[in-house]
Amino acid sequence: MSLNIKDEQVHDLVRQAARRAGLSQTRVVARAIEEFLARMEAEDEREARRRRLDALWERWQREPLTEEEKAAMRQVEESLYDPETGLPA
């Protein structure tokens, strides 16, 4: 397999990175692509979480909480703070 990059600036950057890291140029490119893909995956996960939270927020705005849900929320809130000082637990 081969990858033919016809951009002298890219070649120079890869050479610099390889020299500084003490790695082969191939390994530097592989590591850069792996890290890039990992960042993209993390962004996708953040976006999916944001969409889920938005959907929950919309539901909460439309539907009032049940008494059971309100009690559960109070219990969670109370567990976050020291009852004597009111400071975070």
Image (cartoon, rainbow, N blue to C red):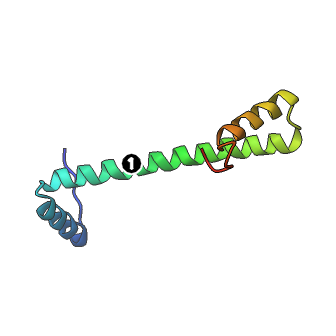
Residue 38 pos. (x, y %): 39, 47
Q: Looking at the image, which residue is at 83% across and 27% down?
A: 68
Q: Quadrant of residue 61?
A: top right
Tell me if residue 13 comes above or below residue 54 in the rendering.
Answer: below
Amino acid type at mark 1: Leu
Tell me if residue 60 comes above or below residue 7 in the rendering.
Answer: above
Position of 42 compared to 51: left or right? Answer: left
Q: Quadrant of residue 5?
A: bottom left
Q: Residue furthest bottom?
A: 9
Q: In the rendered view of the protein, which quadrant contains the C terminus? A: top right
Q: Nearer the viewer, residue 20 or 67?
A: 67
Q: In the rendered view of the protein, which quadrant contains the N terminus? A: top left
Q: Looking at the image, which residue is at 18% across and 70% down?
A: 12
Which residue lies under the disc numbered 1? 37
- How many C-alpha atoms fall within 10 Å of the one at disc 1: few (<14), some, or many (≥20)? few
Position of 86 compared to 74: left or right? Answer: left
